[in-house]
Amino acid sequence: MDNLISLVNKIQRACTALGDHGEASALPTLWDSLPAIAVVGGQSSGKSSVLESVVGKDFLPRGSGIVTRRPLVLQLHKLDEGSREYAEFLHLPRKRFTDFGKIFELPQVGSDVVNCVRNWFYLLIANRAAAVRKEIADETDRETGRSKQISSVPIHLSIYSPNVVNLTLIDLPGLTKVAVDGQPDSIVQDIENMVRSFIEKPNCLILAVSPANQDLATSDAVKISREVDPTGERTFGVLTKIDLMDKGTDASEILEGKAYRLKFPWVGVVNRSQADINKNVDMIAARRREREYFATTPEYKHLANRMGSEHLAKMLSKHLEVVIKSRIPGLQSLINKTIAELEAELSRLGKPIATDAGGKLYSIMEICRLFDQIYKEHLDGVRPGGEKVYNVFDNQLPAALKRLQFDKQLAMENIRKLITEADGYQPHLIAPEQGYRRLIESSLVTIRGPAEAAVEAVHSILKELVQKAILETLELRQYPGLRVELTNAAAESLGRMKEESKKATLKLVDMECSYLTVDFFRKLPQDIDKGGNPTHSIFDRYNDSYLRRIGSTVLSYVNMVCATLRNSIPKSIVYCQVREAKRSLLDHFFAELGKMEQKQLSQLLNEDPAVMQRRSDLAKRLELYRSAQAEIDAVAWAK
């Protein structure tokens, strides 16, 4: 069971080291989920003396006014008998405080020299004894300054000794009713709010310290504890200064639970008096006197077995172990869930930015490669979007070709006009070859429109897929500058490919215009043999029937060419646009990147400072939760 308290101690220390103090923030908090015992009391209630009695050491700052201005997480670790005791602060991990101020007696030889040595040695030990106390005060000032302000950032002090039980206590600032010089008027409410923020959590046990020589109804500790724990399920009552009560009065009714009942019995303690503290009375002797007081005082003799600071420490340790054990399953579930959430958010935010030029260039190249891979997956059908290109070839282009109106070019008057003009001064002998050429060329020119439209349609689809790939490249979300540059670079590259594609595709149309298929002309005599008569007058050859036959023949040829181009235009577009987009979409951008200075690279990776801070905070918090997970797993395996 002892390792359960050690487990929580380690997690608490990790919380403080990584910035989790249980305060309200945008980050998940583990601190609030850890079982703890908070010590609550008004000023001059004897709260500090109770803690020192539990530890068996005189180590807390003393003075008038508000002395405790930051929460002190006091972690006690029991060592084997004979081990040397020492103290450590979390903020001074490599420094051990090994002297707690034990006074060594010198031989009594009655010499003035010996008395001088004795005084010097006493002062030396007293200074060493004040080392822990001074460090608490100094660390408080580092956070709050030398003002009287308070802070919720805790100080962690671990004490390792054979004379303690495994226990963790949180010493909170003493409740007060009046602000002193140098403190703002809000200090009274500020302290109460801080204390309340600790003890209102369901995982926090409350050690309410009240002086017996004051009316319990006016006790600050009892009042605030009752507000947050009205049933007393989490509250342990401690009654101090029992030995200072007026003659004829005693605290037996309170200690027996008759005056103010709690779930757990009240514990009375007798602390050292101020005179004892001034005389540096040994804690062991103070504990012995405390035991004797309860054992010999008639009013408390029957309660002696559950009175005193030693009993209080053992009782708290035992109960804290039980609470921790009951909370472990829920704590594990919370940690696992939070780790998954933190990892998911960190993944969304992306990796941190490199600091050197080479690292920045590498980061940019990696992000661009991720984008390029996603873009290719769209074109290859791994992701949706590439099928739109095929739709252009299978539906849009054929429909556009079908919509071409050849009526104007093949109207009777236009045929007669072109045939006559083509013959010139020498009428054609067998077939009007030049007339055919002009009719075919004037018809085929109209195919350039659907060809260009197909190029433009595929270009629009490729640009649309760039936008999709940009959005789906999660790493680009954190770098708006790079996202814009990459989008522009891809658009420029696609623009160059479109122009090349347009040239190549229109050349296909021009080729069909510049060279007619020979078989077409070879069929002309056969057509004449079937229905024509070459002995007719030349002027008879321009009659309507003859011209209609020419128009029909031209239309047949144009349709044949359309069928050919319907297959060749997609090949040209894919070769010049789709294939090149897959192969070299970012080649020009990569070449420009290689010429950039570090400042320009930094501008591309100019991330929102809020995002950078959020990533840093999440990484620390994830480290905390993983550390807690490892600690809990280690305890589970040890069982």
Image (spheres, rainbow, N blue to C red):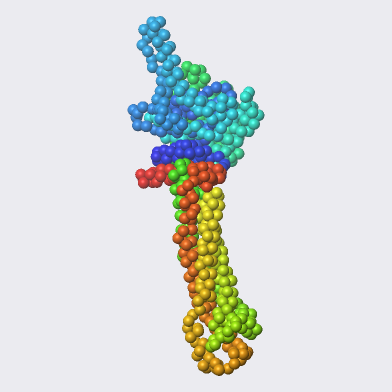
Count of number-bearing discs: 0
156 sits left or right of 110 in the view: right
Q: Give the quarter of the image for residue 224.
A: top right
- Residue 196 % position (x, y): 58, 37
Specify whether residue 186 is in view.
yes
Q: Give the quarter of the image for residue 397.
A: bottom right
- Rendered-image quadrant of the C terminus: top left
Specify whether residue 399 is in view.
no
Front residue of 40 and 241: 40
Q: Is residue 409 above or below residue 168?
A: below
- Residue 404 % position (x, y): 60, 77
Q: Is residue 48 above or below residue 365?
A: above
Residue depicted at 45% across the width and 18% down the height:
126
- Rendered-image quadrant of the N terminus: top left
- Residue 564 % position (x, y): 50, 77
Front residue of 114 and 500: 500
Residue depicted at 50% across the width and 64% down the height:
577
Front residue of 454 and 428: 428
- Residue 618 % position (x, y): 50, 45
Residue, far left: 82
Residue depicted at 51% across the width and 21% down the height:
273
Residue depicted at 53% across the width and 72% down the height:
510
Q: Give the quarter of the image for residue 178.
A: top right
Q: Is residue 633 above or below residue 225?
A: below
